[in-house]
Amino acid sequence: MENYNSLSIGKDKVLKPFDFKIEKNNNGEYTYKSYILEDVVNSSSVKAINFGFGDVESDFEKRNPNLSFLPNATERVIDYNEQQKIDVVKSGEFGRFYRFNFDNAYFKNSLIGKLYQKNNYFNGTLNEEQKINAKNIFDYMFYLNNSSITSLIKNEILNEYISLKSQSKNDNVIEQSINNFINFKNEDSDPKTLEEVSSKGYNGKFGRLIEGKYFLVKGDFSKAFYSKTNSYAIDQLKRNGTYLIKDFESTDLF
């Protein structure tokens, strides 16, 4: 069988279970803690998924300072100091999607997992080399969370959200449905065809063989990029995306 790479998510998987939440303030506006963002005040049709790790931190904030879902001063990841970055690395949780399960064998065998083991999971007093390693992991995960490959995953979640919303599902049902769509349930729930991906969901794995071909996500790849001028080849991303995650090369995803 052809060798291929995947990213697993769910109980006992490489990534802890995804826990999609919809959060609004008393005015019915989406907050920073919400995984789905909409500008309801300006009746905007623009929707976005927020994994809470730099997703909405950019010049966009300066142009739209009053939006309800912008992070406050303590939530802005881009402004973290050295100790805050080390604390994040020590926790293994980089926002809401990339949350490592330190006990998972595949994580331990990955390059990033070996870095954690080599540095005693960054516990205790760190020397200068360990601090540099921690900051490198933090930066890598920041880039990964805001990379093209993560935007593909976000696009799948967003499309599922829009579909559920169009069926007039309430927020609680939408949250549960999206979590079931993403997380591992059991071996019998693995999709065998593209149609089953739509009906069963991903069952906790991005990157698998479907009908004899490597498959990352089911959506329209061209819609998942922030810019039409993005020069990264879509075919390369489809073939090598999870490989680049595995081998600590997220800077190549831009």
Image: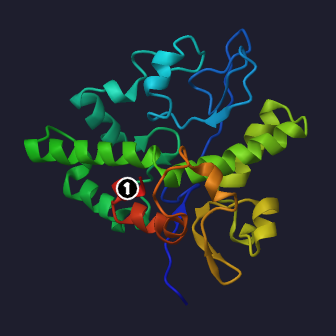
Q: Which residue is mark 1?
A: 250
Q: Which residue is drawn at the image coordinates 25% and 57% (left, top)?
A: 115
- Evaluate whether residue 23 shows in this view: yes
Task: Name the side, left or right, on which 53 lies relative to 22.
Answer: left
User: Extreme bottom residue here?
Assistant: 1
Q: Which residue is drawn at the image coordinates 27% and 49% (left, top)?
A: 121
Question: Picture coordinates of residue 191 (x, y %)?
Answer: 74, 70
Q: Is residue 249 above or below residue 26?
A: below
Q: Is residue 18 above or below residue 185?
A: above
Question: Picture coordinates of residue 120 (x, y %)?
Answer: 22, 51
Label 1 crowding class (10 Å Cα cut-off): few <14, some 14-19, many 20+?
many
User: Extreme left residue here?
Assistant: 128
Q: Quadrant of residue 110?
A: bottom left
Question: Picture coordinates of residue 125 (x, y %)?
Answer: 14, 37
Task: Name the side, left or right, on which 188 lies relative to 83.
Answer: right
Question: Picture coordinates of residue 166 (x, y %)?
Answer: 87, 39
Q: Which residue is drawn at the image coordinates 56% and 49% (left, top)?
A: 228
Residue type at mark 1 is Ser
